[in-house]
Amino acid sequence: MKNKSVLSLELYALINPILFWLDFSLEKPDRLSLFKMSWKTLLKIISVLPDKLIDIDEITIILPVLQKVNMFC
């Protein structure tokens, strides 16, 4: 089995593009469906992460997105 740091790096490689699409979707109101799909994908990925094997802080990932959503609204 891979160690924590390798798994964490691989997950960041997966999560970073989703965060990009979330940012992109918040630039214009007509991209709400893209935001919804990206948000659900991100939440699903975070919900299946094993607690003891991954060294990723979910709050660090989600909080900036929620701040941008607040500014968008």
Image (spheres, rainbow, N blue to C red):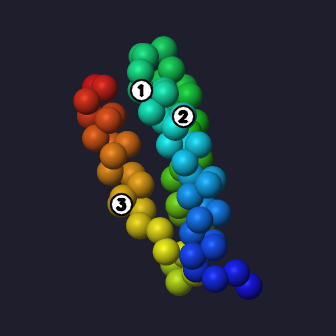
Q: Are marks 2 and 1 in contact (CB under 8 Å)?
A: no
Q: Is residue 16 above or below residue 9?
A: above
Find residue 28 and report its horizontal and vertical position in percent.
Answer: 43, 16
Amino acid type at image mark 3: Ile
- On residue 57, the disc is none
Q: Which residue is mark 2?
A: 21
Q: Amino acid at mark 1?
A: Leu
Question: Is 59 left, or right, of 50 in this rendering?
Answer: left
Mark 2 Cα-neighbour bin, 10 Å: few <14, some 14–19, many ≥20: some
CB of mark 3 within 8 Å of CB of mark 1? Answer: no
Q: Residues within 10 Å of mark 1 (few under 14, many from 20)?
A: some
The quarter of the picture where residue 70 lies is: top left
Residue at image mark 1:
26
Among numbered discs 2 and 1, the one appearing first in the sequence: 2
What kind of residue is marked 2? Answer: Trp
Classify residue 56 as left or right of residue 5: left
**Gap in angstroms between the C-alphas marked 2 and 1:** 9 Å
Q: CA distance from mark 2 to mark 3?
A: 18 Å
Q: Which residue is mark 3?
A: 59
Tell me if residue 45 can be seen. Answer: no
Q: Is residue 28 above or below residue 20?
A: above
Residue that lies at the very extreme toward the right in this rendered image: 1
Residue 21's place in the image compared with 27, above or below, is: below
Secondary structure, mark 1, is: loop
